[in-house]
Amino acid sequence: MSEDVYGNADSFHNTKPAGNTDENICMNDITKGSQMRTPHSSGGQDRKCAGFSIGDLDNKSHIMLYAQILLNSFVVMFSPGRYKLAVVLVCILLLAITITILKTNDLQLRYKSLLEEKDQLQHQYNNITADNALLEERNAFLIHHESQLETNFNAVMAERDELQRRLGEIESHHIKQHAVDVILDPDTAALSLILSADGKQVKTGDTRQNLPDNPKRFNKSFNVLGREGFSTGKFYYEVQVKGKTRWTIGVARESINRKGQIYLSPEYGLWTIWLRNGTYKAHADPSVTLSLKGTLQTVGVFVDYGAGLVSFYDSDCWNHIYSFTNVSFTEKIYPFFSPNLNKEGKNSAPLIISPVHGCPIK
């Protein structure tokens, strides 16, 4: 085709095409690749481009826009000298349409995914709400039954305490039937010990007494034995320890060492408990720290010779303190007492052998 058909660049831009002026202006904007704008005329009307009002496209599909532009462009641009421009424009529009379609599909997939996720979350929320309601119902049920169980437990504990009290009374009654009248033996008392005239009390003096040293007397410690020994049956006695900070009470075999150091152990023929620095211990092998509810005021000592049993009780409230069991007695045993050191008057109170009062069963 001749140059006159296609024209050169100058003749193309300087020749005013026939037809509607606004339409041709729009087409020139497109060929220059400029973005479509919507300037207003002096009369306030939207600028018309290929039969469309750009201002009316607020929510219309981009696909419809491109398709309409393409259709109108074919009419205008498929004319002599504009085939190349038309082909380029068509390719651009097709590419734009393809991109828009892909974006639209992607948005639709994302929207669908979000809807599914929303449904799942709603389902989970419904389940959680139902579970919470069930948990609240179960919690109310448990609180109600917890209150009932607590009431029942308190009733059972009260019944248990009453049974223990009754058993204690029975045990106390049974044991106190074997009460004996214990008198301290002055011939066994260490020289620093002071005995009462009736042989019922012993305390530690400030000086050693001038007494004959016989084979029965303890010469190095603060010990004294009861006058009467036992080789059969059962016996029980009580010792008041009120006001004292150190003491040792129990039973000893007749052959116990009376001279030199004394070892408080069953191996050496002593079954005792003591108080030192606020701590109570049973001198077993090894020794046992005793856990008591309060401070001992009166200690009860019970011996069953045949059964090999030595037991200690808090006789004021009749609580069991400790027992030596399976003891093999082979000789006489005697009540054993030690008021211990005076400690500058802090432990000056005496050990007192108390009368045993019966505990009648109610």
Image (spheres, rainbow, N blue to C red):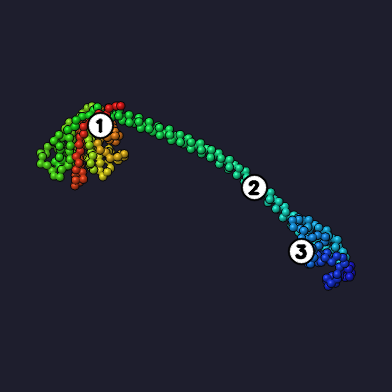
Q: Is residue 95 left or right of residue 201?
A: right
When asked about the image quadrant of residue 15, the answer is bottom right
Tell me the distance, in whole angstroms, between the alpha carbons under discs 1 and 3: 116 Å
Observer-nearest residue: 41 or 79? 41
Picture residue at 23% right of the left edge, 28% below the top:
178
Disc 2 packing (10 Å; few <14; some 14–19; many ≥20):
few
Q: Is residue 322 left or right of residue 133?
A: left
When asked about the image quadrant of residue 243, the answer is top left
Picture residue at 85% right of the left edge, 69% below the top:
16
Residue type, mark 1 in image = Phe
> For the residues carrying marks 1 and 2, which lies nearer the camera in this image?
2
Q: Which mark is residue 302?
A: 1
Q: Position of residue 67 (x, y in %)?
A: 80, 57
When asked about the image quadrant of residue 188, the answer is top left
Q: Earlier in the sequence, mark 1 or mark 2?
A: 2
Observer-nearest residue: 2 or 20? 20
Q: Position of residue 61 (x, y in %)?
A: 76, 55
Q: Earlier in the sequence, mark 1 or mark 3?
A: 3
Q: Secondary structure at mark 2?
A: helix
Q: Are circles 1 and 3 on residues that touch, CB within 8 Å? A: no
> For the residues carrying marks 3 and 2, which lies nearer the camera in this image?
3
Q: Is residue 307 above or below residue 3?
A: above
Q: Secondary structure at mark 3?
A: loop
Q: Which mark is residue 38?
A: 3
Q: Is residue 54 above or below residue 12?
A: above
Residue type, mark 2 in image = Lys
